[in-house]
Image (tube, rainbow, N blue to C red):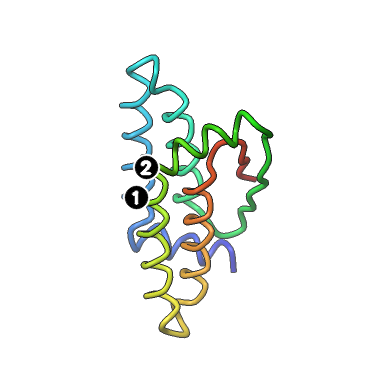
């Protein structure tokens, strides 16, 4: 199911979303101060390309907490809202429920990317 879900995900737009995250990561890496943001963008690109079968482990302690607060205030809240709305729309149909669940996973990661590891 994971392979089929990932193939359908990529064909229906996952490739473009992952590419956009990767480009954002490259842009962030151009500046020295943007490197931590670039790392998080690449983490989102990795999850967005093939979300089925991936798990996220959260942690990182106080430094990650402080970075996540700054991230949420400037970027994360808007990403999370967008992913959550898309997840709700997908969950409105029986066929879209697995995709909606993956979008909710991305919404949580977009709120707390620092200290999280995608496996």
Q: Residue 66: give x, y in percent of width and height.
A: 55, 33
Q: Residue 2: give x, y in percent of width and height.
A: 58, 63
Q: Residues within 10 Å of mark 1 (few under 14, many from 20)?
A: some
Q: Does residue 9 sit above or below 100 in this rendering?
A: above
Q: Nearer the viewer, residue 77 or 5?
A: 77
Quadrant for residue 75, please give it. top left
Nearer-N-terminus badge (1/2): 1
Question: What is the quadrant of the N terminus in the image?
Answer: bottom right
Q: Is residue 6 left or right of residue 75?
A: right
Question: What is the quadrant of the C terminus in the image?
Answer: top right
Q: Which residue is mark 2?
A: 75
Q: Residues within 10 Å of mark 2 (few under 14, many from 20)?
A: some
Q: Residue 29: give x, y in percent of width and height.
A: 38, 22
Q: Nearer the viewer, residue 62 or 101?
A: 62
Give me the disc on residue 102. none
What is the CA distance from the residue labelled 1 to the residue labelled 2?
Answer: 16 Å
Q: Which residue is mark 1?
A: 17
Find numbered disc 1 in the image and state the secondary structure of the residue it sits on: helix
At x 56%, y 60%, the residue is: 52
């Amino acid at each position: 199911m994971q392979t089929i879900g990932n193939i359908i995900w990529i064909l229906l737009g996952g490739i473009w979303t992952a590419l956009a995250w990767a480009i954002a990561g490259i842009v962030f890496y151009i500046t020295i101060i943007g490197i931590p943001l670039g790392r998080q963008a690449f983490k989102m690109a990795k999850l967005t390309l093939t979300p089925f079968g991936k798990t996220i482990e959260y942690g990182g302690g106080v430094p990650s907490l402080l970075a996540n607060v700054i991230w949420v205030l400037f970027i994360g809240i808007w990403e999370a809202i967008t992913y959550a709305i898309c997840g709700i729309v997908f969950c409105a149909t029986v066929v879209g429920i697995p995709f909606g669940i993956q979008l909710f996973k991305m919404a949580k990661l977009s709120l707390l990317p620092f200290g999280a590891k995608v496996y």
